[in-house]
Amino acid sequence: MKAGRGGVLFWQLAILIVFIGAWEYLTGIKAISKTPGLYWIDPFFISRPSKIVERFLYLASDKVRLSIWQMALSTIQSTLWGFLVGISTGFVAGLVLGRNDRVARIFDPYIVAFNSLPRIALVPLITMIFGFGLLAKIVLAWSIVFFIVFFNTFQGARSVDADLVNSARFLGARESQIMRTVVIPSALAWTFASLTPSISFALIGVVVGEFIGGESGGGLGYLIILSLGTLNAADMMVALFALGVIGIVMALGIKQIEARLLRWRPEYQKR
Amino acid sequence: MAPRVRISIRDLSKTFSQGLREVPAVSRVSFDIYDKEFVAIVGPSGCGKSTILNMIGALIAPSGGQILVDGTAVAGNAPAQVGYVFQKDTVFPWRTVERNIGLGLEYHGVPAAERAARVGEAIKLAGLQGFEEAFPATLSGGMRQRVALMRSLIVNPEILLMDEPFGALDTHTKLNLHAELLALWEARHQTVVFVTHDLSEAITLADRVVVMTRRPGRLKHVYDVKLPRPRDVIKIRESDEYLREYGQIWHALGEEFQEKAS
């Protein structure tokens, strides 16, 4: 078991090293010697690892007006806010509609209609209403996360085992107690299944918002658009790597919380 | 003094609609269940025995006739003095053993200290020591059903409805649970209505066995089980009285199985 895991880690690292080495090497050798600019793979488009590290150190220093840290922070902040507001509103809406057939039937066409709108198409409108700042990005992330969490919680609240509800009733539970001790815990398992995709989608929403948000919105999406304007592949790569790291850390964080709150599920039981 | 009637089933009928078809499940059943009595209802599958239990517990409404619990007609909500143990595993998977058993006390607002004491006692009674903090997913089926049983008993229901609670367990576990259930019942003498398709289980446990006909379920006969108490669930099966009771009721039940087959 242990040897197996070590083997996996070895191969993962090996692939990474080969990939970065090949990238650095292939973008450094000329296709035809002495002809300027003709590389095997042109670093103009995909930059080079050494160049990216160099740009990263520069962007991380205080020589720049807007450092990579500030941009990353702005992206993380809006993502987390959009995510938190999205899951809490989505969860509540899912519970209410999931436990109330009539309300669910009334709202159904509106929810389906709004959810089938491509959220990207809303970016200009959201920007018009909420301006070029943090708020617009949060609203955009929310508009995506809300529906993912909503639909999952809705399903979860609908599929609560009637016998569990009945046994709670026989033990003397009032409606509010049934909600708290039966409906919410069993719906939570469904809600959690939607959290990992939600955080990724929140990040997508925020970055798209930053694409058109300009400098006042800041963020890594802004850095990408800025690099496009100056045709600077290295800066763009810095932003992409930063986004990748942020995405991974957030997803791992969610997994941790999930394993804690759902520790009653067989897959989280350590025997 | 004549024993007090706790549950009175009067001319009870239930018809389910399946699409356009009306399927009669229970047809004009009447009998009384007395205080502190252990009654088992047996019959071929589909005879409506669980349906009767569900109607006593107000989980479904009768199509005809009525049920009185302590003189009050059952309607809408389950009578407060009734507890229910389901056939299906209804232990809450997200709660530990002790928090499952304490559920009813929690619902009734019993203070934490008293709750802990009573739950501890129940865990000892059920032989679940060491599993207080365990989640149901790590327990065997028999242990989960013990948790469900203690969870129902801790709120001291005067009437306990049990719907094939041991149906999914192996014979050995089942016998252990019979012994435990009888011990618990000897201590408190709840009125128990126990639905099962296992005749030996019914005779081992009950004072009276109600035999139902095949669908639509009608009352076929009610047998008094004249076996002395307290009963030893293993030894009782070797006794002549047991075999005589078994033979007699089995004959009646067998008629229902046979007619179904032909």
Image (cartoon, helix red, strand yellow):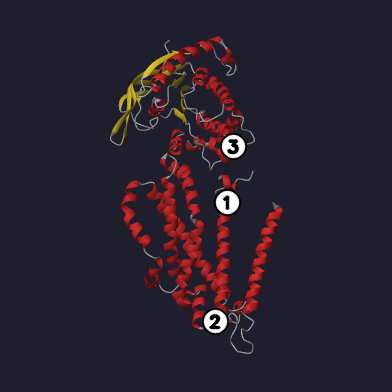
Q: Quick one: B182 or B239, which is closer to the camera? A: B239
The image quarter containing residue B112 is top right
Is residue A125 toward the left or the right of residue A46 in the image? left
Give the label, 3 or 2, closer to the camera: 2
Q: Quadrant of the N terminus of chain B?
A: top left
Q: Is residue B227 visible?
A: no
Determine whether B220 is above or below A200 in the image: above
Q: The residue under label 1 is which amino acid type?
A: Ala
Q: The residue under label 2 is which amino acid type?
A: Asn
Element class at badge 3: loop
Element class at badge 1: helix
Residue closest to the far right: A3
Instruction: Tell me the distance, in whole angstroms, between the alpha carbons under discs 3 and 2.
Output: 60 Å
Question: Could you say where residue A238 lies in the image, as x and y percent from the top left?
Answer: 58, 75
Q: The residue under label 3 is which amino acid type?
A: Leu
Give the label, 2 or 1, closer to the camera: 2
Give the number of the disc on residue A259. Answer: 1
Q: Chain of mark 3?
A: B
Q: Quick one: B261 or B1, which is closer to the camera? A: B261
Residue at 41% x, 27% y is: B50
Determine whether A29 is above or below B137 in the image: below
Q: Quadrant of the C terminus of chain B?
A: top left
The image quarter containing residue B52 is top left
Residue at 40% x, 72% y is: A127
Question: Could you say where residue B108 lies in the image, as x and y percent from the top left?
Answer: 47, 35
Q: Which residue in the structure is indicated by mark 3?
A: B139
Is residue A83 toward the left or the right of residue A102 in the image? right
Question: Could you say where residue B186 lies in the image, as x and y percent from the top left?
Answer: 54, 19
Give the number of the disc on residue A232. Answer: 2
Question: Could you say where residue A198 lies in the image, as x and y percent from the top left?
Answer: 48, 59
Determine whether B40 is above or below A155 in the image: above
